[in-house]
Image (cartoon, grey):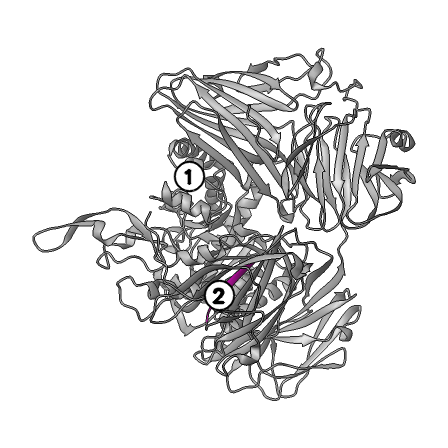
Amino acid sequence: MQPITNRPSPLRFALSCCSIASLTASLFAAEVTIDLTTKRYLSDVSELDRAKYFNIHTTWDTRRLEGEWREWAEDMNINFGRGFWGPYGEHKTGVPYPSEDDAKTAGAAAIANSRNASKYPYRTRRNVRTQHPRDAFKLDDDFAAAGEWAANYFKYYFDDESRPEFFEPMNEPFVHADEFGTNDQVKVREQMAQLFAEVGKAMHAKNVPTKVVGYSSAWPSMEKWDFDHWETRMKMFMDIAGEHMDAFATHLYDGINVQGQDSQRSGNNSRAILDLIETYSFQKWGIVKPHAITEYGGIEDGYPDAYSPEKSAQSLRSINHIIFELFNRQDRLEISIPFITGFAEWYLAAPNFHPYTPALWRPVPEEIQVTKDNEGNITSFTVGSFQLTEKARFYELWQDVRGKRAFVSSDNPDVQVDTFVDGDTAYVCLNNLDDEIEHTISLSILKSVDDFESVRIKQLEIYDLEAPDYSDETSNTAPGSITLSPHGTAVLAYKYSAPIRFEKKVTVKEYHPNSYLQPISTNQAITFEFDGLEIDEGTASLRMGIGRPHSRSKKPTITLNGNALTVPDNYAGYDQTGRDDFFGVIEIPVPYNTLIQGTNTLVARFPDTVGHVSSMILKVNTLGDYDPTLNLGIADKSGQLEVQAQGPEGLRVKIESSNDLETWEPRAIGHISDGKFTHSAESDSKFFRSSDAGPREEVPHPQSANLLYATLISQRSQILLEYTHEIDNPAQEAAALEIIIDSQPVTIDSIGRQEDDPQTILITLPAQVESGKEIRLSYTPTLKTSDGGDIVPISDWPIPNPIIVDGNRIKASSNHDGERGNGSGWTVDGDASKVSASSTVVREGDHSINITFPAGSSLINLRNEGGTFNIQGGETLSFTAHHRAANMSGGDSYQTELSIYDADSHQVLNGKRAWKRTDTDTWNTTEAEYTFTSGEAGTYYLGFRIYASANEGNLTYDLHIDGLRAEAVDP
């Protein structure tokens, strides 16, 4: 591997003992306040969803993305974003389009070919497919037929695990409206919108789980021609196709992207663009449809063709500016893709083998071999190895950032900030939007320094004519301030000796008014009404979007409910002087006491005429207590244990082993930072306790079937036991409970049903549970199967249990005397007719599946449809599988892939896949830990795909499944 070279760069931060007053006058000061004890929600979203942000503009099957480079991408936690191919590349001739039967036949062959590809194990649904307008659009086409074909293509040409999540029918279509043989570009744009609409209609009608996004505006200068650009482009598109779009696609670039002025979208301009789209969405449908930012970045200009570090790094300043803006829109963002491409080998020959500027990799110049004819024309060339470009700095900078949002604020709109908490680490992210001014940022962190251990500071500084400075240093002293040069970015990872505990929460909610895009006239009142405000305690601000000439005022007089607001002189980013008009958002502080419950009235008056107020959005940050509730219980008749969050967050749970019931597994594992919870019990003789800070520990296990063990840090007085089977008498259930706090039994004060949920038992303790106390709940219920029989411990079950091969389905049987038990519910498809299989239930809760593969290549899908678990969002689950293959000869290999399936659609959940490929016959382990977002709430089950390549056949494959585990056990 040839990495990019680090330039030595001193860290630009000051330790706590340094005073801001000592800084030179050339530096501008800003203050950032971080409260790590207050969790921040965007609507109901707190966890950073990396798959929405850290992507490459290429596909998972791109050439050369293998070996060391795939390992590098995985190490950087990078996802794949976008590629050019689709139904209109598959069929280019227009009407007549292939029939549905044709699509089924050709699609089956396409799936088979795809599965045989070497990169198929790396597939992901998390990508966008798009096409060039010249391939997709034909003037006066039968757009309904074109849409039908697109839906059939995505339905039949992919299996459920490779089908792209997004389809963008055309890339940047409107800037190509002059390429279709007519001067009537209005007609072309409207027909293009019709194609988008018909694709969306057909996809939804056929229930194809691919989201349709558009129109991917390349030139979103919506204020042009007194907002006629908005009226004839984006608004027209939303009017014609918006109802059928799953998200609105926009491309945001600093510089000139195909058409338009050389301008900076970063900062206030990109905010105005996105706010206008959101506002019109709310006006039209009463909801804010999400965004899909399928390209964004910066256009490098003025540099020679040859590669240079400074040229490669230029777009990173824009990417970092824009990603901070997108962080604040995660609750209404489907995906964002920085325009950083893969190897881009298609580009190399034209510019004398200089790399494509947006590329993440470039060829090693000394390893390019070129063949030319007698006239000096290139007839062929080969490229040896590749190396990283400076684009890699973006992924290195953000490699580790994850977690839940914490409260953070900046007193300077040019200093962008965000903070994420992950266990004992807080990531404080800072960015300087200014293009000329250094900012020295004072860091005020509301967190005790007693448990501070270290801080790792990554910093990226980008210059016009010099290679970028990238530094990565660790200090044992927390900095009191940090200096960012123009366009500089820093990520500070604060490490503490214990998990960071949330005590408060702040919820961000945005309110849209009943009007938008209002013309400005001298001293004329422009009125906006915001309905349905809910107020309590917190802060607020107003985002005012305006488009008008630079000579006109940006400071109207504004009153909210009769109270005057002060419009600041400063706003995020530059003043747009290189553009014909100003189009941007100015954020205005709103004193919280000016808000009223219900309808709020805002009146704006400008001192001069011309332009429009494009949007007004009222952002309210409501502060509240953070007090999660512990919710435990039996999930269903199978004996599954449910640990799920009730309220904003659940307890952090680690699962060490299963107990004496075959199917006991956690159905949800929640993350919080203010408590620990450990579940235990392996058969009747062992009880394992774990903590984040220490090793696995075996302790005596009382003779009860099920035992829960927790250390509570925040105070609680109630414990919930939830059931999904009928409860005959809650009082009888109380007899099965024993609660011990700090080794002392506690009398249960009361037990009863919750009024809003008759299947939940509410147990009330006589007093608050004090912070730091250990609580142990021992519960020995009487569980019944569907036929009324008792569930017997697995040790009493007959083993081995046979797997019954029935056609192409393998059913695992776990019956006791042919009646009792819940059956593990494994099914199989794929090449099942080729193989013989048997199953043994081993140990407590584990399964062993044995498959014999014939000669050739085989693919088996194993899905535990009978072993579902519920997810509410925010949980993390761990899985472990052990596997080996006997009778392997030279050239034999197999791959085991562990996945999470949606119980309703039977599709693999995005990003929930792990694999292990091997050509040895030793035991191998595939482990996976998945964090579920709030948008992934649902019911799931575990599944495996096994790929085998056997030269001589009779390759015997053994799979041991440990279920949900935090720690591997040698089988």
Which image quarter: residue 611?
A: bottom right
Residue 138: give x, y in percent of width and height. 39, 53
Q: Is residue 66 left or right of residue 830?
A: left
Residue occupied by mark 2? 489
Q: Is residue 492 magenta?
A: yes
Looking at the image, is 213 positioned above or below residue 682?
below
Kind of element beneath mark 1: loop
Residue toward you, 267 or 263:
267
Residue toward you, 809 or 477:
477
Query: Around disc 1, counting alpha carbons within 10 Å, would you say few (fewer than 14), some (14 to 19), or many (20 or more)?
Result: some
Residue 531 visible, this angle = yes
**Residue that sits furthest to the left in the current view:** 374
Q: CA distance from mark 2 to mark 1?
A: 51 Å
Q: Main secondary structure of the magenta part?
A: strand
Residue occupied by mark 1? 98
- Say what amino acid the circle numbered 2 marks: Thr
Residue 722: give x, y in percent of width and height. 79, 37
Residues rendered magenta in the picture = 487-493
Residue 616: give x, y in percent of width and height. 64, 72
Which image quarter: residue 539?
A: bottom right
| Mark in the foreground, 2 or 1 | 2
Residue in the image at 77% along x and 64% along y: 534
Q: Is residue 944 left or right of residue 615?
A: left
